[in-house]
Amino acid sequence: MTRPSYAALLTTLALLLATPAQAATQCGKASWYAMTSKTASGERASPNTMTAAHRTLPFGTKVRVTNQRNGRSVILRINDRGPFVKGRVIDVTKKAAAKLGFLNSGWTRVAVTSPDKKPGRRACG
């Protein structure tokens, strides 16, 4: 078991201490990928893990990703950078996409929050 980085702890703390005006929810599109090369964090990517790529969150940060179309949610660990497509906020592994219920469509609208927050389907308006 690895210990979380100092930056990941600070990010989690900031999400937990955010006031309602500073909503800790990021809304947008998610897509999935199934690469097996090395991630930006240096670990080997696997489509069968519960991980994700985010542009700015520190590696090791855990987030809850909720599919806004069906309400399904999973907790993922950030281990890569991306997505690099406008309007997308997170890329998830193939396994995560299957659990979220958007494997066939390739993308869906999501809410990305701290792991302890459970937004409903309407979290993003």
Image (tube, rainbow, N blue to C red):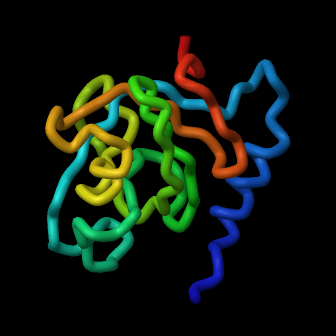
In this rendering, position of residue 98 left or right of residue 18: left
What residue is shown at x 49% (from left), y 64% (from top)? 59
Question: Is residue 109 or residue 73 the one in the foreground?
Answer: 73
What residue is shown at x 43% (from left), y 33% (from top)? 67
Question: Is residue 54 or residue 104 the one in the foreground?
Answer: 104
Residue furthest to the bottom: 1
> Which quadrant would residue 42 be assigned to in this image?
bottom left
What residue is shown at x 60% (from left), y 27% (from top)? 120
In this rendering, position of residue 57 left or right of residue 113: left
Eyeballing the image, is 4 above or below 53?
below
Q: Provide residue 97's location: percent of width, then percent of height.
A: 30, 48
In this rendering, position of residue 27 left or right of residue 19: left
In this rendering, position of residue 47 left or right of residue 79: left
Eyeballing the image, is 31 above or below 45?
above
Quadrant of image for the C terminus: top right
Quadrant of image for the N terminus: bottom right
